[in-house]
Every structure is written in C-alpha cells, then in structure tokens.
Image (cartoon, rainbow, N blue to C red):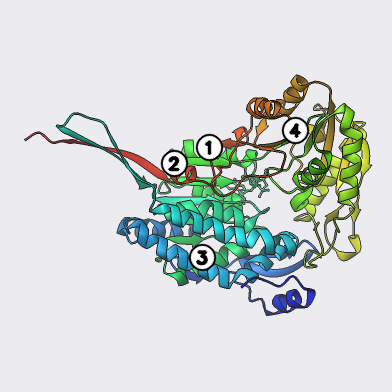
Amino acid sequence: MGLELKKEAINAAVSNLQLRTKAFINGKSVNSVSGETFATVNPANGKTFAEIASCDEKDVELAVKAARKSFESGCWSKMPPAERKKIIFKFCDLMEEHEAELALLDCLDAGKPIFDCVTIDAPETIECIRWHAEAGDKLLDTISPTGSSNLSLIVREPMGVVGIIVPWNFPAQMTAWKIGPALATGNSIILKPAKLTSLSAILMAELAAEAGIPDGVFNVLPGPGSTVGKALGMHMNVNMVAFTGSTEVGRTLLGYSSQSNLKRIILELGGKSPQVVMADADLDITAENAVSAAFWNMGENCSCGSRLIVHKSVKDELVKKMVKILKTWPVGDPLDPDTRFGPMVEEPHMEKVLSYIEAGKAEGAELVMGGNRVLEETGGYFIEPTIFDECNNKMKIAAEEIFGPVLSVIPFETEEEAVAIANDTEYGLASSLYTRNVNAAHRIARAIRAGTVSVNCFSEGDMGAPFGGFKESGFFGRDKSIYAHYQYTEMKAIWMNLED
Ligand code: NAD
C-alpha cells in the first residue's frame, strides 16, 4: 500500500516501522558471522536509528556457497521463464503491499524527500522489476542460417552467481535496475547495498523469499565495500559483478576481475552531464527541466545536469527563471511531504560538497544563489541549492563530479563551441538539449558523446530506454530495457550435424 502524503499518516507509518537489519543468506535472516554491526544514521538529524549486520569475507563465502548450490540445482536457473515470471510478479505484489515501508526506508536512510520516495522511487522500483519479469519469457533465441544438414542454435543462458553492488543515492531503484534483469534471466544473486542505505535491500530480499524465490537465489550482505565488495570482486566462484557507483571503485573492480577469474564486470559510473541550451529554446520549459536536472535528489544523481551550457543571449533570463523556481523548493525535513530538498547523505559528503563551493568562489565563479550549509540546528547535513555563473570547463566545479546541489553555468556563442564544451569531459553518462529547431536537435544530439540525450526535457526515458554511459561513465553496461537482459546472460552456439 502506498503512503498518504500527509504528516499524520507519515508519522504513524514511521512509528509502526519495523526495521529489518540482518543479512539475508540462503533464504534466512542471519547475523553476520562475526556478530559485528554498524550504525546507520538519519542524515536529516545526524542520529543513529538502526544497527545493521556488518558482513565480511566469511559471510561472502557462505552466500557464494548458497548461491552456487541454488544455481547448480536448477531450482531457479532452469525453471521455465514463465514460471519465474509468476514468482517475480508475486514478489512485486508483496512489494506493493509494503510500498509505504519501501518509501520510508529510503527516506530515512538517504535523506531523500518522502514526496519523491512515495511518488517516484518506490513505485518505479516495483514497476522496473515487473517490467523485467514480463520480458523474461518474451526474448526469443535464434537459429542462424545453415545448409539443411546442420542446425545452428544461438541460445542465451544465465551467467551463474552474480554479485550486485549498488550506491546510496537511489537505494531501492538502483537495486531494482540490477536485480530485475538478473533474476528474470535465472541467475542467483548476492546483493551488496551501500553501507549508508541497506534497509530497503534487506526488505526486498525477505519479500522475495516470501514470494517463493528459492533459498540461495537472492542473498543480501550489508557491509563495507572494502571487505564485502572486494571479496565479491575477487571471488573465484562469482561469475559476474554488476556495479553502480563511482568511476574510481568501478576501475578497482576491473582490477579484481583481472586478478581473479576474469569475471564479467559491468559498470554504471559517475557523470558531469551537460545541459545545452540554444538561443531559440523555450525558456520556461528549459528552466523547469534544468532545475530538476541539476537539483532533483539534491544533485546526488549520476545523471545530474551539473553543467548548464547556455547561449549568451538567453543566459541571464534563464538563470533568473531558475532561481525563481528554486525558491519554491522548500529545503527541510525529508519526512515533511512539502519538502523538495533534503540533506546530503552523510557529514563527510556534505563537507566535500562545501569544499567544492569554496573552490568555485576561489576560482572566480560568480555565486548567484545559495552556497551555504543551512538548518544546522537540526543536526542534519543540509546545503542550499547553489548556482555559479560565468564558469568555464577548466574550473574544478565544472570539471569534477560533485554529486551535490552545485550548478555551473557556462556561456557559449556558437553551436560548435557548445558541443565542444559539452564533450570536454572524461564522463559521458547523460545530457539534455533545449532548442525549437528540429534539425539542430538531431545534429547536436548525435554530436554529444553520452549514453542519454534528452531533448527539451530532463529524462532517462521509460523502462524501454537503455541507460548507461560512454567514456569513463560506464563499461559494457546498460541498465533498463531489454538490453539489460543480454548482459546477465552468456551466449552459446549449438552446432548440430544432422547428417545420417
Ligand atoms: P561508491 O563507488 O563509493 O560506492 C558504490 C558501492 O561500491 C557501494 O556499495 C560501496 O560500498 C561499494 N564499494 C566501495 N569500495 C569498494 C571496493 N573496493 N570494492 C567493491 N565495492 C566497493 O559510490 P557511492 O558514493 O555509493 O555513489 C555515488 C557514485 O555512484 C557517483 O559517482 C554516481 O555518479 C554513481 N552512480 C552512477 C549511476 C549510474 O547509473 N551510472 C547511478 C547512481 C550513482
């Protein structure tokens, strides 16, 4: 059941919340082998609200054994896809029954506004997993053309034991983007949530078991990346790791693979996404979308449009419109249904974002709005939405991923210049483009080196549209869409001689 966006309903749901804090291995909720726990803190007030099982290499060993056993038994991997679909649908129905809980957990753990968790994160998590389950029995294998004395089958088979490592910014949704296709294609999975946001992942595993996903198929190991994540990456009996997170850790995972069993690694990484605004753009539409691109989820968004590359002739008017819109985005308690802007996820991250703001000032960018920590008395880690004008791509704030609410506005004069600035980055995850000229839209969309270009909007498209990055924003990875299914499967050629 969804959560009513009223203060009383939200407060009642918080007081009824029963937190599930254990690891989930082989169909059971368990303490970590060491018995250790770690604290999870609400970033809106800085207070610990749960102690969570802290796993390490020993728990990874148990989970890999359970996952391998379930995979080899065929209880899931060899189940007809239509049967798997029914069970995953049941899992989605259970998530729907627990939708309020799913929304609240990400709100408390990550400081995401409850409005977003209720209207976007929780429903889209469920929709994503349903979409992949539905697709699971629709993908056809192929037969390649041969002479009549041969039969050439090209079939896809699940990868095996798949490690899934996700970040904290969209805890349930990033999990869904991975577990949806991984489960639908018959793999056994070991999910490592970000240490800051483990609770929704644990809930999902428990509901999956209740729905009938067999023991060992869906395991969750909360804990640090440097132990659990590393042990998954280095394990000789893990066939693949699907990762979403920073480019730095993604690079490390490729190293683990090369040092161990050459497991398949797919990476969805960071970004410094451009928003290109041409002189003929509709500035009202652009302002609405550009604000969302830069500041939705407090800028803690991999596809955050953190560089506004805007034609000189419309820059001042656009920035004015954006400031006006941002002033209607209340900053505050994420549990308040009116809040559109919550805290940074943790204190060190807040400090990092503040240090970028100082760098922007020092480099001579013009501070137009924000720039400060606010609501300090709450104990939370709030920063105002911040806009710097008159930036250039050489500035630290315009070149590096900040992962916070800091927008760099960069003026341009010609289309060539705009494209060159947009592409002058090691990243290539997402981008937006605003123009009323359809020819220019086509031309510039093709010229921008990024996995997604959204035109006259800020969007990653629906579930049918693939999502992933060019350059250092990704490696072999596409989440969402039918293409996600291919990466969780191996391709096999079966060549049959039919001669008597
Ligand atoms: P992070 O890379 O620090 O952590 C991501 C995950 O990796 C966490 O679960 C963490 O515990 C784990 N990890 C850390 N060290 C590890 C190691 N040595 N071995 C294995 N696992 C390890 O990223 P974050 O701070 O959680 O998230 C922010 C980053 O994620 C940003 O760069 C953002 O752009 C990126 N991101 C990308 C996408 C996308 O789809 N491309 C989506 C969301 C976030």
Q: CA distance from mark 1 to mark 4?
A: 42 Å
Name the image quarter holding residue 416.
top right
Q: Position of residue 16 (x, y in %)?
A: 68, 79
Q: CA distance from mark 2 to mark 3?
A: 30 Å
Disc 2 secondary structure class: loop
Q: CA distance from mark 4 to mark 3?
A: 41 Å
- Could you tell me if the residues under marks 1 and 3 are in contact, i.e. CB atoms within 8 Å? no
State the residue position of label 4: 436
Whether residue 184 sits left or right of residue 249 in the image: it is left
Q: What's the mark number on residue 263?
A: 2
The residue under the point 48% across, 39% down is 257
**Comparing labels 2 and 4, the label whose residue is closer to the camera:** 4
Q: Residues within 10 Å of mark 4 (few under 14, many from 20)?
A: some
Disc 3 secondary structure class: helix
Whether residue 418 sits left or right of residue 170 in the image: it is right
The earlier-in-sequence mark between 1 and 3 is: 3
Residue type indicated by callout 3: Cys
Q: Position of residue 311 (x, y in %)?
A: 84, 28
Whether residue 342 sits left or right of residue 167 in the image: it is right
How many numbered discs, if any? 4
- Mark 2 beta carbon near ligand 1 (under 8 Å): no
Residue type indicated by callout 4: Arg
Disc 1 secondary structure class: helix
State the residue position of label 3: 92
**Comparing labels 4 and 3, the label whose residue is closer to the camera:** 4
Considering the image in quadrants, where does the N terminus appear?
A: bottom right
Rendered position, 89 above or below 362: below
Q: CA distance from mark 1 to mark 3?
A: 33 Å
Q: What's the mark number on residue 254?
A: 1
Q: Position of residue 217 (x, y in %)?
A: 42, 60
Whether residue 256 sits left or right of residue 449 in the image: it is left
The earlier-in-sequence mark between 1 and 4 is: 1
